[in-house]
Image (tube, rainbow, N blue to C red):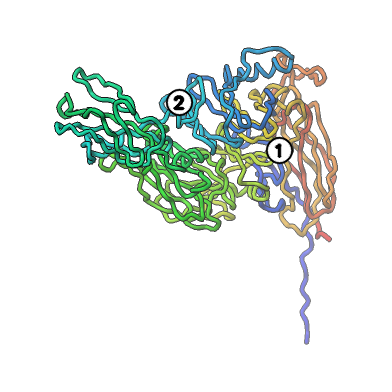
Amino acid sequence: MAYKAISMPSASAPSLSQINVTNFLGVDLTNQPSNVDKSRSPQAPNMIRDVPGKVRKRMGWHTLVTMEERINGYHPLADHDPLLHVGTKLYKLPGGMEGLATYGAALQNGEESENEPEEVYTDAADGRSKSWEFDGKLYIADGKALLVYDGTQVVKASTIAKIPLVTIAKAPAGGGQQYEDLNLLQPLFEEDFLGTEENETVYQLSFGQLDETPVQVQLLQEDGSWAEKTEDTDFTVNRETGAVTFVEAPGKSPVAGQDNVKIIASRTVEGYADRINKCSIGIPFGVNGAADRLFLAGNPELGHYDWYSGQNDPGYWGDTAYSVLGQSDSAIVGYSIVNARLAAHKNAAAAERNIIVREGNLVDSKPSFPIVNILQGEGAIAPHSFAYLATEPLFLTKLGLYALTTADITGEKYAQQRSFYLNGALLEENGLEDCFAAVFKDMYWLCVNGKAYILDGLQSVSTDRSAPYSTRQYAGFLCTNIPARVMWVEDGTLYFGSPGGQVRAFYTDPAQLTSYNDDGEPIYACWRMPDLQGKNFYRNKTFSRFSVELSSAVATSVEAWGRVDGLWELLFSDDTSARYFDWGNIDWSKWTWSSDDTPRTIGQKIRIKKVDKAGFRVENGALNEPFGLEAISVEFVETGYYR
């Protein structure tokens, strides 16, 4: 058989290629470094968005004070000193966070301070707590007891809980009109009777099995006042049957049509109060979406139940004001509100019907919260991961961070994953159920294992082919050395509490050199470029120039590194070119006469020859030095075939 020769094309003449990055969109920790888009980085610890499209080193934090136990929560109350939950104790903070900083500084100097935290409660649960303000009071759930803070003291909500008026217009023998439900949080209840001319002496309560709490009785007088009567003097009580027998019959009411006998008794039902006290998660919600009732869940014994309070009164929990959501094999993990509807998120292991949507209505002048939809999707796993970013409620599942949108609410399932670019690292973390989330300046921070996984609400891209059912993905960042157990924001500052009891604050001024350290330790930040393979992965590449445009600062520097065959080598460093002089922010060891505060281009020739690919990164790990990137450029030529 004859074979025809085929001539192969010769290698083309070298032509200069450039890779220019001017738009920095965070990290991609999910794709392989060679498949990462040039606008993202496969490794960029402690780099964060500056303005959209530009990145800088994150600012550092400093310790305000170290308490004796781990920090479990921070609870502000309008016009009053906030509370700090430390171990099993609650402290009132005179002067708020500013006062705590003053106290910490005085403590460090061995001085006394009028801002010393005041211990106001000692029997809290040693676990994270949540709080909500209603009618000038703060209600705190920690899984042990529902607490209430009025700005002065903290008490169990059961001690001030409403005594419900169960029945009105009741005849001595029974009947009447049901008015309110029993209060789960405490055992007292009131019934009002309308006496008769028959001079009955026995008044029958709706409930027997009364406890030993003294029964209270009041009788209406002709002048409209109420007279107190005394048990065992003016009346006796059969606690077994609930019958109250008067020595002298109360008789007909002196005011026509008005109840003239008030009886307050106590009937303790085991486990009633714990239904509320053992709850640890909640959200304000009400009729037509009004935030005037508190919904609570998270009771470990009744994980698929939730309860709702009286209107603007989380001291009243009617014994019929509850819902059973789904089956007992999955628990409620958290809540979201979308389009004036309440979504309860459950934790079923598979992609089952894990979000139950309700709305709030009035039915016969009473609140009703019927289920209007049940959505299929991944179950939530972290009770403290729920937070709102750019109006979207986010929550953590085993597949990453998801959003619940208005389009989802009326559909059959939800698939709005938002953390694709972080999932490669995030989902490898241990203990994701213990994550804690906070939103600060359009960024969602999810803290776990000393790291913060961050989604940027100002930067997103449309549907990614790797997550085709999601309408968009947020730009993501990863910060290290963030030992946060809880986080909160006050007066434009981001604070966090640590497992070791430290209360810490992030610096707020990006222009100050002293903003770039963690308790005096330097912050390492870098931006690694994706592996560069050129137009043809099989061709030889010779990289000839590397340039970086740095944001100028009073003190800043850069090191540029190249990676060939898995090994990194320093290409060049520069600690002078991007600096400028500023009388208000002087570091004499880094003096410069330049007054140019515009971004500076730093570039040098490099020589990386005959490789199929190469990697590059720029970094800064110097103490008290900002580090901002405006652009990166690499030049290279492609020649013969790689062997």
Relative to 221, does residue 21 appear above or below in the rendering? below
**How many labels, in total?**
2
Tell me if I can see residue 39 in this picture. yes
**SS at badge 1:** strand
On the rendered image, what quadrant is the C terminus found in? bottom right
Q: Nearer the viewer, mark 1 or mark 2?
A: 2
* Residue 72 occupies quadrant: top right
Q: Which x, y percent locates residue 178?
A: 26, 39
Of residue 408 and residue 587, the one placed in the foreground of this image is: 408
Residue located beneath label 2 in the image: 137
Q: Residues within 10 Å of mark 2 (few under 14, many from 20)?
A: some
- Residue 34 as seen in the image, left or right of residue 180: right
Tell me if I can see residue 630 in this picture. no
- Disc 1 marks a residue whose amino acid type is Thr
Q: Which mark is residue 505?
A: none
Q: Which x, y percent locates residue 502?
A: 68, 28
**Residue at 61%, 20% in the rendered image:** 117
**SS at badge 2:** strand
On the rendered image, what quadrant is the N terminus found in? bottom right
Estimate the spatial distance between the alpha carbons at disc 1 and disc 2, rounded to whole Å: 37 Å
Residue located beneath label 1 in the image: 480
Q: Which x, y percent locates residue 147?
A: 50, 31
Relative to 420, does residue 88 appear above or below in the rendering? above
Q: Which x, y percent locates residue 560?
A: 80, 38
- Disc 2 marks a residue whose amino acid type is Lys
